[in-house]
Image (tube, rainbow, N blue to C red):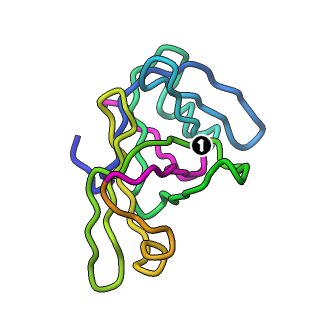
Amino acid sequence: MKTSARNQFAGKIKSIQTGAVNDEVVVNIAPDRDIVAVITTSSTKRLRLAEGSDVVALVKASSVILATGREELIFSARNQFSGTVISASRGAVNADVVIDMGDDMQVGAIITNTSFDKLGIEVGAKVTAIFKASSVIVAVKA
């Protein structure tokens, strides 16, 4: 599969909570590590999702929010992965940041240079990558 979404997490569906319009899909991507997606019920049916299905959770880097000093706040976003910055580079407007989440997994984030500076992002910094369940796209093999 080729896609422009740089954050791609292969896993198995752990559970599906069906709703009237949307479903909550929990994807296990590593031992004790899940990503939660909220997708339409029609997508769940069209993709033939079920517990145990192999899927890929996709998250655009521009949908990832970074936080430092996380112990001071509680976030409503379901997907929160703490780690260490392993790459950080500034562009003209935005910065590209890569975080090592452990379990041989990384998550990339594109943030504004202003946020980059305010957060004091640098290689080795501890940060938390946060993204909403509604920002996760679920894909299956055709």
Element at label 1: strand
Mark 1 crowd level (few <14, some 14–19, many ≥20, 10 Å Cα):
many
Side (left or right) of 69 relative to 142: right
**Quadrant of image for the N terminus:** top left
Q: Is residue 141 magenta?
A: yes
Location of residue 141 in the rendering, given as x and y in whole percent from the top left corner: 31, 30
Q: Amino acid at mark 1?
A: Ile
Location of residue 49 in the rendering, given as x and y in whole percent from the top left corner: 51, 25
| Camera-nearest residue between 130 and 73 | 73
- Give the residue at x 43% y 64%: 62
Q: In the image as oriented, which residue stretches furthest toward the bottom?
A: 92
Q: Which of the 4 image quadrants contains residue 61?
A: bottom left
- Give the residue at x 30% y 56%: 123
Q: Is residue 37 magenta?
A: no
Q: Which residue is mark 1?
A: 39
**Quadrant of image for the C terminus:** top left
Q: In the image as oriented, which residue stretches furthest toward the left?
A: 2
Location of residue 103 in the rendering, given as x and y in whole percent from the top left corner: 35, 26
| Camera-nearest residue between 116 and 58 | 116
Side (left or right) of 102 relative to 127: left
| Camera-nearest residue between 45 and 110 | 110
**What is the total number of numbered labels drawn onto the structure image?**
1
Q: In the image as oriented, which residue stretches furthest toward the right?
A: 20
- Give the residue at x 45% y 49%: 126
Range drawn in magenta:
124-142
Location of residue 56 in the rendering, given as x and y in whole percent from the top left corner: 38, 34
In the image, residue 37 above or below residue 127: above
- Give the residue at x 33% y 42%: 106
| Camera-nearest residue between 106 and 51 | 106
